[in-house]
C-alpha cells in the first residue's frame, strides 16, 4: 500500500507545491488563481463548491475520529485511540488546505457547515465507519472533485484533491488492518506512526526517507508514539 511510484509522486508534489506539471495537465492554458476574487469564483464555480464540500467532509471526519479515539480509550484500545488521533490531525490539515484555497477565490470568508459528528459506538463499529468513510472519499468523492478541478483547470484545488485522495486510501488501509487484528494489536508494526504534514499520509513502523505520497522530506514527518 505504501509502495507508490516515487517518481510519480515526486512529480505530483512538484505540481502541487510549485504549480508545475501535474500528469496530463501541464500547459500554458492553465489558469492562475490570481485576479479579482469574484472573478476567480466565477471562473471555478464547481471547484469552489467541491472545495467547500471537501472542507465539510474533512471537518466531520476529524470530529468523528476524535470521538472514536475517546471511545477506543474507554474500550481499552489505547493504541487504536492514538492512531485515530493521528489520522484526525491529517484530516484537519486537508480541511485547512482546502479552506485556504476556497478563501483565495472569494472576497469574504465562508464558514463550512460541518455536520454533526457520528455517535461513537464500539471500537470495531467505529473502525467499520471509518473504513466506509475513507473508502467513499478515495473511490468516489475525491475522484469526482479531481475531474471537476481538471475540467475548470484549477491547479491548486486539483493538487489538494489529488493528494487527499491518495492519503484517504492509506487511512482506509490502516483502519482495515486495525479491524482485522482488533483482538491482537500489532505492537511492532504500529509502535510508531508518522504523519506527513503536507499531504496527511500516515506511515507506520519506521520514518521513511521521504513521504511516499508527496515526496516531502522524511524528517518533516510528525512522529506519534503509539506503543509507549
Ligand atoms: Fe482519511
Ligand atoms: Fe506527504
Image: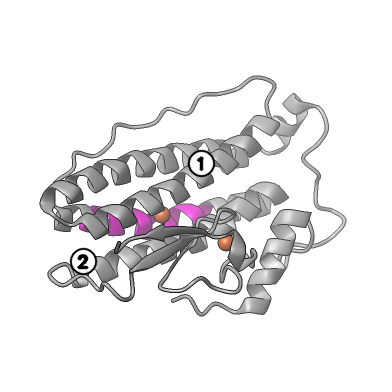
> In the image, is 124 to the left or to the right of 95?
left
> In the image, is 204 to the left or to the right of 123?
right
Please say if the residues under marks 2 and 1 sit with CB atoms less than 8 Å apart: no
Could you tell me how far apart the alpha carbons at marks 2 and 1 are, in whole angstroms?
26 Å
Q: Is residue 160 above or below residue 26?
A: above
The residue carrying pointer 2 sits among few (fewer than 14), some (14 to 19) or many (20 or more) residues within 10 Å by Cα, namely: many
Label 1's element? helix
Residue on which the image places disc 2:
179
The region drawn magenta spans 127-144
Does ligand 1 reach within 8 Å of label 2's beta carbon? no
Residue on which the image places disc 1:
95
Depth check: 205 or 136 in front?
205
Q: Is residue 209 above or below residue 97?
A: below
Which quarter shows the C terminus? bottom left
Label 2's element? helix
The earlier-in-sequence mark between 2 and 1 is: 1
Amino acid at each position: 500500500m505504501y509502495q507508490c511510484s516515487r517518481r510519480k509522486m515526486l512529480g505530483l508534489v512538484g505540481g502541487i507545491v510549485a504549480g508545475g506539471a501535474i500528469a496530463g495537465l501541464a500547459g500554458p492554458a492553465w489558469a492562475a488563481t490570481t485576479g479579482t476574487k469574484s472573478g476567480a469564483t466565477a471562473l471555478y464555480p464547481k471547484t469552489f463548491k467541491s472545495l467547500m464540500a471537501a472542507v465539510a467532509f474533512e471537518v466531520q471526519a476529524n470530529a468523528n475520529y476524535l470521538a472514536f479515539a475517546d471511545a477506543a480509550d474507554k474500550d481499552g484500545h489505547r493504541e487504536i485511540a492514538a492512531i485515530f488521533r493521528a489520522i484526525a490531525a491529517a484530516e484537519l490539515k486537508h480541511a485547512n488546505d482546502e479552506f485556504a484555497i476556497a478563501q483565495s477565490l472569494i472576497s469574504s470568508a465562508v464558514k463550512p457547515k460541518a455536520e454533526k459528528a457520528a455517535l461513537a459506538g464500539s471500537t470495531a463499529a467505529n473502525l467499520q465507519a471509518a473504513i466506509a468513510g475513507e473508502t467513499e472519499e478515495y473511490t468516489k468523492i475525491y475522484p469526482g472533485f479531481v475531474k471537476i478541478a481538471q475540467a475548470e483547470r484549477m491547479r491548486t484545488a486539483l493538487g489538494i484533491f489529488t493528494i487527499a485522495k491518495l492519503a484517504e486510501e492509506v487511512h482506509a488501509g490502516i483502519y482495515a488492518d486495525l479491524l482485522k487484528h482488533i483482538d491482537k494489536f500489532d505492537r511492532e508494526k504500529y509502535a510508531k506512526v508518522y504523519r506527513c504534514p503536507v499531504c496527511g499520509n500516515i506511515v507506520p513502523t519506521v520514518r521513511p526517507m521521504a513521504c511516499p505520497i508527496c515526496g516531502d522530506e522524511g524528517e518533516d514527518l510528525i512522529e506519534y508514539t503509539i506503543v509507549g
